[in-house]
Amino acid sequence: MVSQAFKNRTRDEVIAAFRESIRKKHEWQKKAEEDIKRIRQERLQLSL
C-alpha cells in the first residue's frame, strides 16, 4: 500500500506528501480538541 503511494514520485514529492499528511493530522487533532472543549463547556453550563 505504501509503496503504491510512492510509485512514480520523486523523493521531494514523497517528502512533501508526508509533510502534508502530518499537517492535516495536526489540523484534525486541533479541531477535535476544540470540539471537545466546546462540548465540555456546554455540558458544564447545563449542569449549573
Image (cartoon, rainbow, N blue to C red):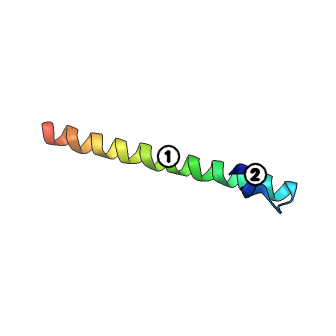
Q: Kindly identify the amino acid type of the residue bearing the numbered disc 1.
A: Lys
Q: CA distance from mark 1 to mark 2?
A: 29 Å
Q: Is residue 44 above or below residue 3?
A: above
Q: Nearer the viewer, residue 17 or 34?
A: 17
User: How many numbered marks are there?
Assistant: 2
Task: Indicate left or right for 38 with 27 as reference.
Answer: left
- The residue positioned 79% from the left and 51% from the top of the image is 15
**Residue visible at 41% across and 46% down?**
34
Residue at 75 percent of width and 51 percent of height: 3
Q: Position of residue 23 (x, y in %)?
A: 63, 51
> Callout 2: few (<14), some (14-19), or many (20+) C-alpha neighbours within 10 Å?
few
Q: Nearer the viewer, residue 9 or 20?
A: 9
Q: Mark 1 and mark 2 in contact? Answer it, CB < 8 Å.
A: no
- Quarter-of-image position of residue 6: bottom right
Label 1 CA crowd tier, 10 Å (few <14, some 14–19, many 20+) = few
Q: Position of residue 37 (x, y in %)?
A: 35, 42
Write down the residue under mark 1.
30
Which tag is nearer the camera, tag 1 or tag 2?
A: 2
Q: Please tell me which residue lies in front, 34 or 48.
A: 34
In the figure, 7 relative to 23: above or below? below
Q: Amino acid at mark 2?
A: Ser
Residue located beneath label 2 in the image: 3
Q: Position of residue 8 (x, y in %)?
A: 83, 63
Helix, strand, or loop for circle 1?
A: helix
Residue for point 57% across, 46% down: 26
Check disc 2 and report its element: helix, strand or loop: helix
The part of the image, by quadrant, that contains residue 40 is top left
Q: Position of residue 14 (x, y in %)?
A: 79, 54
43 sits left or right of 3 in the view: left
